[in-house]
Image (tube, rainbow, N blue to C red):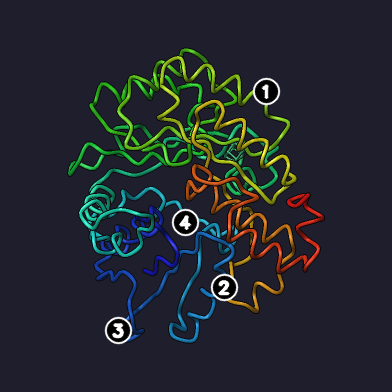
Amino acid sequence: LIDFDGKIVNLALMKLSTYYKSKGYEVVLNPMSPSGLAKVHCSVLFEKNREKADKLRSLFPKIEFGGTGWDLTTTLPPEIEECRPDYDLYQAEDIYRRLSGIMTKEKKWEKANTIVNAGIGFTTRGCVRTNCGFCVVPQKEGSLRHVAEIAELINPRSNVLILLDNNLTADKNCIEKLREIRDRGLVVDITQGIDIRTMTPEIAKALSEVKHLRSIHYAWDQMPSESSVLRGIDTLSRFIRKGKHLCFTLVGFNTTFEEDMHRFRTLTALGVDPYVMVYSKKAVKRGKAAKAQMSFEDIQRRHFSRWVNGRIYKVTEFDRYSNWVKDRDAFLGGDSQMELGLVA
Ligand code: SF4
């Protein structure tokens, strides 16, 4: 089984592992050679990695691909989908190697151990929404439907639950599920975030009574949802202080740079941490040649996401952020400072 680009454990591969082990096969994660392999399955999560993953065919001629980054039609057969995940497939080292971000070695090991020992799964698939043009869930999974109980997702090795539901807060059973999580003493990571636009005082209260593994996160992806997002933040913050929120903002899909900056400024003024997600279906290439092919907007977005996500905005304004200024001036040529109004 090849986990091509996952950051945490991969549920589909864990189910495949259980299935093949039940048939008497030995299962290997991320093999280095095709020798002795009867079958090879590879999961690709991000479309930008598809081309690179496809090159594995030369090493593993029998390889079969799946995952959202590969296509939206390949699904697990029902007899595999029904399997419980194999919690022995991943070791902490497998996750440790893939963790990014600034943290001490100890923190990184702690995080890797938490992830491999956690229960993981979906209680619902699909979503109630159909108008998020950048999201593959409606096309891939259809409308929201129940698939499992919270109890079925628990890993006896720990009380941490990685809940993968696409839109937990739109589920009509959301409050009951949150109460069950609370009553079972679970610590939950709602990985896909909550839909802040549908926040009610009752859901906010139920969320506040649950232990969360990390910050409560939600998204403000499109400009027309501004009022519902701000209303939702207001409701949620009556029960969970804003310092514990994190708001993802999608850039590069259908917003202008001014709108991206507006969302950043609105969120920080409210005391909510923003996190920029750059929309891209292409792999980010590095180096001078790749940079030369980028548009002004691409370069600006790349620097904007670093400026926000690296918290550089706390020490300098964007138009004074040296990496951006350097690339902007190189792109625009000598007149750029005048054009952008940086000099009188
Ligand atoms: S609410 Fe979230 S999961 Fe549902 S379609 Fe929009 S982005 Fe996708």
Could you tell whether 139 is left or right of 15 in the image? right
Residue 114 in the image: above or below residue 228: below
Residue 343 in the image: above or below residue 176: below
Q: Picture coordinates of residue 68 (x, y %)?
A: 55, 57
Residue highlighted by disc 4: 76
Specify which label sits upstream in the sequence, 1 or 4: 4
Few, some or many C-alpha atoms within 10 Å of disc 2 (few <14, some 14-19, many ≥20)?
few
What is the C-alpha distance between the residues marked 4 and 2?
A: 35 Å
What is the C-alpha distance between the residues marked 1 and 3?
A: 58 Å
Could you tell whether 3 is left or right of 236 in the image? left
Q: Amino acid at mark 3?
A: Gly
Specify which label sits upstream in the sequence, 4 or 2: 4
Specify which label sits upstream in the sequence, 2 or 1: 1
Q: Amino acid at mark 2?
A: Arg
Residue highlighted by disc 1: 227
Q: Quadrant of the N terminus?
A: bottom left
Residue highlighted by disc 3: 36
Q: Residue at x 38, y 48 (%)?
A: 82
Q: Residue at x 52, y 16 (%)?
A: 235
The quarter holding residue 205 reads top left
Q: Picture coordinates of residue 69 (x, y %)?
A: 55, 61
The answer to whether the residue bearing label 1 lies less than 8 angstroms from the nearest atom of ligand 1 is: no
Element type where label 1 sits in the image: helix
